[in-house]
Amino acid sequence: MIIEPVIKGNVAKNCHPLGLKAALQKQIDHVKNAPTIHGAKKALVIGASSGYGIASRIALAFGGRADTIGVSFEKGPNDKGLGTAGWYNNIYFREAAEAEGLLAKNFVGDAFSDAMRQEVIDHIRTAFGGKIDLLVYSLASGVRTAPDGTTYRSTLGVSGKPLTGSSFDLEAQVLGEQTLQPVTAEQQRETIKVMGGEDWQLWIDQLQAAGVLAKGFKTVAYSYIGPQSTYPLYKDGSLGAAKEHLHHTADVLDTQLRALDGEAYVSVCKALVTKASAFIPIFPLYITLLYRVMKSKNMHETCIEQAHRLMFSRLYPALGAVVTDADRLIRIDDWELRADVQDEVEALRAQITPDNFKEVGDFSGYLEEFHALNGFGLTNVDYSAEVSLEQLLQLKP
Ligand code: NAI
């Protein structure tokens, strides 16, 4: 079969497995050409199959020779479809890591469940050397079923008044307006249940109780704060409240892990094109403006540059302790938040019209990264070549 990209709204409906392999290799090559990370040797990545999670796993494995376990929720191919991009990322990551003599185990299923935690613990004990020295928490989900069986759904919403802003649709490629409604107290509570720190805490509690955390163990979860212009949309909205809970959880875990000389952190990352961020109304337009400015200053980073910088210069710096700000947050959003960058972003924003938004912002760069997430648009892939479903069906996580 020949596979062409299909986008509905801001969601990719298919992926190109061979393109995904090439995109993964590009990230591996980046890390191999970057300075060596002297960090974790046994890492568990929750949310390992795409975006920040796969980039972290690649940085740790190919930049620091870490054995890794990845947990993700992905779908394989069947007679109705090709499955999800993350499915193939997991497989091609494992193949590449094993080819270099590294352990790489994929668990595909629900990271929010106790059953998954137990499977991972059993694997660490029986096949992974007994202990891990890093847990990266990189989940992005709209729904969580907690261990007591209650299902919570997150809501993208604001606090106070409705927020209307310019927003584009990748499918139609037109700029329109979108309005985010204020969330109710119940919606806010559920969003915190899904995207806050409760599940991260459960992972650490159960791994610690099982005795599989090494002395000096570290854990890091990913967050976003953004510039003031996006506060109404993100930081002051429902997602921001969930992230605040995550930040608080890091402090609780940091205290809890002292018994092991362990540490827990939140890393505040840069706004980037991922499956999750494309879904947030209004936000992608900001990303196109940010990309335009950061590229012009030679400061553009994608997930892999961010993940490498985090591991190399913040979490495992050559000399001394983990690098944080005064609030104990690791900041790799520092370049995004520079005053000169944000001033230029706002100057561009003032010029935006429905006719020029593709030229004023880096719309083509956005689209290119979005396609690459799904394996399309890679220069070294022959997209006219037949892809065999039979062969894809034989690939196992
Ligand atoms: P993504 O959508 O690319 O990755 C999400 C990961 O979570 C995938 O591996 C997916 O399989 C996994 N997942 C979702 N539900 C699951 C479940 N029930 N069980 C197991 N795995 C599950 O998202 P992205 O953007 O990489 O987000 C990761 C983290 O980074 C999030 O906490 C996000 O808030 C944060 N972040 C993202 C930024 C961005 O601009 N994309 C900026 C700053 C932080």
Image (spheres, grey):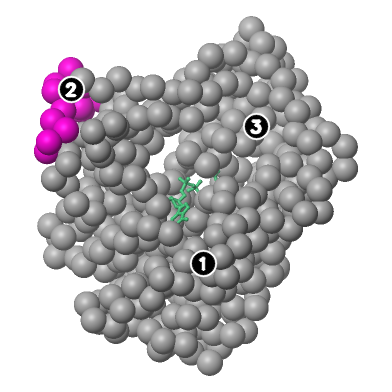
* Residue topped by disc 1: 220
- The span shown in magenta is 379-391
Q: Which residue: 43% across, 29% down?
A: 12
Query: Which residue reaches farthest right?
Result: 160
The residue depicted at 19 percent of the width and 52 percent of the height is 396
Badge 3 amino acid: Pro
**What secondary structure is found at the residue carrying circle 1?**
strand
Asked whether, in this view, residue 161 is left or right of residue 312, the answer is right
Residue annotated with mark 3 = 281
Which callout, 1 or 3, points at the residue further toward the start of the chain?
A: 1
Tell me the quadrant of the picture where the C terminus can be found.
Answer: bottom left
Q: SS class of the residue under badge 3?
A: loop
The image position of residue 382, as x and y in percent, is 17, 23
Disc 2, ligand 1: is the CB inside 8 Å? no
| Camera-nearest label, 1 or 3 | 3
How far from the left and from the top, in percent, is residue 176?
68, 16
Residue positioned most to the bottom: 259
Residue positioned 66% across, 24% down in the render = 167
Q: Looking at numbered disc 1 in the image, what kind of residue is underneath it? A: Val
* 177 is higher (above) or lower (below) than 37: above
- Which badge, 2 or 1, is on the more N-terminal residue? 2
Instruction: Give the residue furthest to the front.
Output: 149
Spatial CA span between label 1 and label 3? 27 Å
- The answer to which quarter of the image holds residue 222 is bottom right
* Labelled disc at residue 1: 2
* 334 lies above or below 342: below
